[in-house]
Image (spheres, coloured by chain):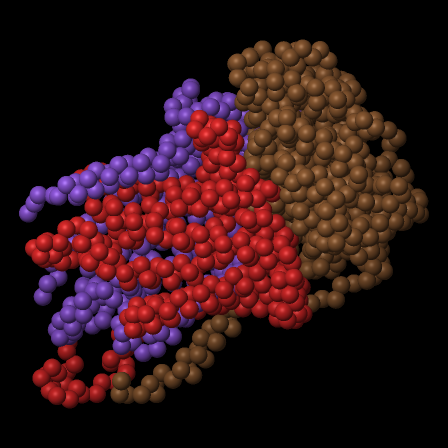
Amino acid sequence: MPFQRSRAERAFDWLNVTVLTVVGLLALYPFVYVVLLSFSTAADVARGGLLVLPRNFSLSSYDMVFHDPWFLLGFGNSLVRTVLGVAATLLMTSLAAYPLSRPNLPWRRQIVFYILFTMLFSGGLVPKYLLLKNLGLIDNRLVLVLPLMLTAFNIIILKNFFQQIPPSYEEAAKIDGASDFAILFRIFLPLSKPALATIALWTAVIHWNAWFDAMIFITSNEKQVVQIFLQRIVIENSVKDMQFGTPNFNEQLYTPDALKAAVTVITVLPILAVYPFVQRYFVKGIQLGGVKE
Amino acid sequence: MFSASPKKYPARIVLTVLAALWLSLAPSGCRRAATPASTAELVTTFNALRDDPQRHLEIVWLGSPYAEGGQPGSWLQRRLEEQFNLSLEVSFMPVFSYDKLLKLRLTGGQIPDVFWLRNAGEVRRAAAHGFITEVPYETLAHHAPAYLRLLERHAPDAWLLSLVDGRNFGIPTFTTTVARLPQTGVWNRTWLERVGIKKTPGTLVEMEEALRRFRTGDPDRDGQQDTFGMCPWRPGSSSGSGTLDRSFEEIFGAFGVMQNGWMLHEGRVVWGATLPGARLALETLRRWYADGLIHPDYMTLPIGNLEVRSQLFKGKVGYIMGFNLGNYGVFEKKYPTSLQSLHQAIHPGEELAPGWFPIGPDGHRGVRTWDGSIGGVIVFGPQLVRAPEKLVRVLAMFDALARDPELFIELRVGRRGLHWDWNEDYGIRKRAPYDTRAVASAELMGEGITNQIDNNYGYFAPFSAPQEVVDRHTIPAARQFQETYMRPEWGLSDVLLMADTVPSAYKYLHRLVDLQATTFTEIIIGKRPIEAFDDFVVRWRAEGGDMLTREANELYLQKQAIRARVAAFLVAEKSPAPPAP
Amino acid sequence: MTPAPSLSPRLLTARAPTRTFRQRHGGLFLLLAPALVYFAVFHYAPMVGLILAFKKFISAEGIFGSAWVGLDNFRELFTNPQFRAALGNTFVISALRLVFGFFAPIVLALMLNELRVLWFKKAVQTVTYIPYLLSWVILGGIFLLMFSTTGPINQAIAQFSGSPVSFLSNDFWFLFLLIVTGVWHSVGYGAVIYLAAIAGISPELYEASTVDGANRWHQVRHITLPSLAPTIVVLLILNLGHIMNAGFDQIYNLYNPVVYGVSDIVDTYALRLLMQLEFGLSTATDLIKSVIGLGLLVAANAIARRATNGEQGIF
């Protein structure tokens, strides 16, 4: 029921909006600049002095990306990897976080430490490579999904959320004889949508932007992700020697920045588009989606 | 708490299971440590064989990573296989991941038969880890004498690249134009004219005057004092490729100093930056920076050629150092992608002109050259000791390429009439459809649309054609330009070829180069006084410099000895000499 | 879900009948098993590589065959003044990032939470989350341009104070730039977790407090923040564990030799020095980082537990 706000509160509201607008603009501007570069000719970028709008609008950078024969395939691979990765992570993290959130679990502290330890200690790239080789995962699509399935960080965050769910829910379910599996899936997960959405978002960003693992572990072009192809496009079009000139005028010879900007925009947009879908889980009181018994 | 004691799940069992799992999966990277054969044994093994051209061999080949876009089954590969009766298994790693991927591959046990290493440091490390086999000088002289003769002529010091603890671990490669000839500077001639200077500056004093007028004379005619004189290459090493600091090369050269290299000074090998000439150069630069003759942000620009050039395009400076840019093609408007053309597209009417590097007060001048080799060593996996015929075949291949220029060219840039034609303006010019990057890369292994036979980027022939062949395939106008602006005697070369041929370089060099870059830059921008140079020299010596200098002097003597040895072996071979130039 | 067949109604008897370990906890361990196996395979198995920190690794001799050198690698690192400087810088920069960067997302989340207009709230949320998606390769280039002495920021400063600020070549200002841009980069992204946590707070609490006459400030102090406390504590502890990662990408793309002194961190130092096959030294470096991180994490966790009587904390 709306009620009269005090003067102080209204003043605060205005201040809040102002500050957040400034923050928003500051956050937005560099991206606007990148978009601007992506729609400029390389010559303009080399000349410098661009601020908000392109001097000469040009699609040449985007042209170069979309005409690359591997682009679409790489895009698809990245998409598949991201979707699989998010699904796998949500599933596995839930399975792990639930038992760890139960205070009566034997050896709970030890197991949490067991998991946490892996967050900080790593054997390095070479042993990891050898391991994946032994498992036959080199140049296998799963190599982009399996090693990233679980992180100690996600498990601990989700466990933390599970711990905050009032014990009455669980007790009620146990009275009805529900198994742990059922409790997890029918009660805890629906109640944890904001946390799950957050983890899904983080995981999606990681998978979508990951390129190092693909570079090392994927060797065939058919399975390669879009990030690698985009890097190649930039490098292949960047200046090498200009000794005797080339018959095809490659205007990227001015600077690769226009192309890099286009590549960045193409990379950022999909993951940006995901965010609004996730935002609806951050509405207050979402968890009371009716599991009252 | 829980009643039934965990008899069924004792901690012991759990731990055992985990341990078993761990051990079974734990990658041990174990291999039988084979004791490497002695030099004498290798000579016996390799030299005893004659190459049998009838015998078909399979070789796993990993060439230079600069073959971008290369794919298996290309024309070049088939031609090579046909010529030398081979089946080649080739693979390509993109340049930006090459070092990492190669390291993983080698550590994982997949060592190619033939592969390419960038510099002495990598060779040393690969040898230490057992990834490559020794290839004695006698073997090379026996099976590839023509190649060795070319090497002796073009890059006699290249042996330093493959030298590890007194033994030779591969075939060094050589380069002609790019490594031998110094690059020029690039002046904005229009700006010079606008500020009243008629001829391109030749001495340091003239250069200073020109830069001063660039700063104060409003050469871009926009009514604001927003221009500076020059912009150098950014200081600090570019990690990964080991490119050393090349900032202000021509200014240091004007005082007879090469900052990052070993020089002969009064009979001893010393590090350039510790010479008194360096101090003089720093004084000059300090003064220049304070007066605004140098772009104030030069040390913060992103690393690379492009950033320096873009200062020219942006109209911020009127002079930059050439690097890859200071040669003929750059200044010609007839090439649509030359620097000249690009600049004029942005600033119509402004003309760029080449310039000699400035002559200093004592008559010194120079910029960096590499004495014929910018690195690159072909190495062989240890498994070839048990399959020596493969090594012998590869050596025979190199020898054949060294003897036969036509074959060499065909295996570098393709067949004349099919892939390329001679063009008066361009020299070797690709014919359609090989003039598009995609096709050229796929068929010709990343030769792309560059038409160079004078560098070591070739995938199968990672060395240059002999100088006389290169000259024959250089258009007269370019030769003229080289005679005028790029005389080899104006180049300063490292007496040990490259800074990291010294054995302990891996331990100290980068640290010292960092110290140098930081100190010199701080002196130039005025953050520290010129006396900081003296402190720097003391510190440099104490933190590894003395050790490196000592090793450098030993290496210098060793280098002479190796050259003599190789010459002796060649004489002993009594093989026919290649066609006289 | 069939109830345990032969047992009498549980809740009404005074004595709970014994159930086997398996019956009481089996389900939980079944759920946990895949994760345990995963960590064993993908994380613990490769940890055998950590031995290399104590060895001089020669590939031909394998991991177990290579010579043992004990603490030599560590000695070599710690006697190197540049490494020690890098270690110090890592702490300083991380501490600064933590102090300024840890609370910023919380504040942002709270502020966003106070917005009434939904479309604006969503818009600002989305916009502040964009910087994190841009890589430092791109951002580095942009910031180097923007903050150069001839760049737009300094042009604006020059209007007011006359002389430009050397953001990129002055020790203090460079750190300032690092922190500010670092916070800017991650604040929107970091706020997401707090927004999620806030979304989980029961609205009844707020309604009840309104009835009691609480204004929004009270609500924040007495409902929102306490509800966020567990999440904040967990994130703080986890961040402390990661303290040795001071932002390699950012620093690598922004730094230059003049500011090596304050901005060279362990990772950038390692990159310049250890680009060759020096497995032993690079593993030793990683091990040092990991041990320090673990130490801080355990300490922070212990403090959290002690301060809240065993309630908060990760383990």
Q: Quadrant of residue A90?
A: bottom left
Chain in purple colour: A
Q: Percent x, y for residue B20? A: 48, 76
Q: Percent x, y for residue B265? A: 85, 41
Task: State whether residue A225 is above or below residue C298.
Answer: above
Q: Colour of chain B?
A: brown
Q: Percent x, y for residue A139? A: 48, 53
Residue found 74% across the figure and 19% down from its top:
B206
Confirm whether residue B331 shows in the render: no
Q: Colour of chain C?
A: red
Residue found 27% across the figure and 77% down from its top:
A104
Residue found 41% across the figure and 32% down from its top:
A34
Q: Quadrant of residue B450?
A: top right
Residue found 75% across the figure and 58% down from its top:
B385
Which is nearer the eye, A65 or C278? C278
Specify whether B511 is left or right of C221: right
Specify whether C108 is left or right of C168: left
Which quadrant, please, contains the C terminus of chain A?
A: bottom left
Which is nearer the eye, B415 or B239? B239
Q: Percent x, y for residue B482? A: 76, 22
Specify whether C69 is left or right of C293: right
Count of numbered marks: 0
Task: State whether residue B281 is above or below residue B391.
Answer: above
Confirm whether residue B543 shows in the render: yes
Which is nearer the eye, A141 or C97? C97
